[in-house]
Amino acid sequence: MIEEVKKVLETVRPALQADGGDVELVEVTEDGIVRVKLTGACGHCPMSTMTLKMGIERALKEKVPGVKEVEQVR
């Protein structure tokens, strides 16, 4: 599952980088929790929760079976 998650993150990364941010994969747990760290402008943006849930989490749930939730690590 980790490789599938990495591939999906590569597809959302250009949009984050266009706004001065990025995403780093921290961990994928056995129970389907993906932990990521938002960096750059995304790390302290007031819209980062929206980006995380409506962008990254939605894409991962659609494309990687078994992903239950995405959590931000600071």
Image: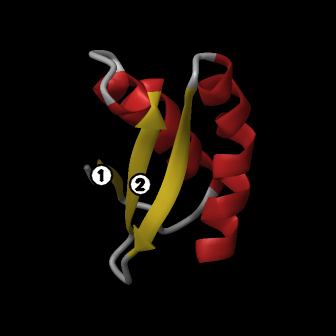
**Is residue 37 found left or right of 7 in the rendered image?**
left
Per the rendering, the mark at residue 71 is 1
Residue that extends furthest to the bottom in the rendered view of this protein: 30
Q: In this view, does 46 lie above or below 25?
A: above
In whole angstroms, how far apart are the C-alphas of marks 1 and 2?
A: 6 Å
Residue hosting label 2: 36
- For the point 36% across and 33% down, the residue is 43
Q: Report helix, strand or loop for mark 1.
A: strand
The one nearer the camera, 70 or 36, is 36
Where residue 24 sits: x, y (%)?
Answer: 52, 54
Q: In this view, does 51 lie above or below 66?
A: above
Per the rendering, the mark at residue 52 is none
**Is residue 6 found left or right of 35 in the rendered image?**
right
Among the 4 quarters of the image, the one containing residue 36: bottom left
Where residue 61 sits: x, y (%)?
Answer: 51, 50
Where residue 47 sits: x, y (%)?
Answer: 33, 17
Query: Around disc 2, counting alpha carbons within 10 Å, would you say few (fewer than 14), some (14 to 19), or many (20 or more)?
Result: many
User: Is the C-beta separation of discs 1 and 2 under 8 Å?
Assistant: yes
Q: How many labels does the image show?
A: 2
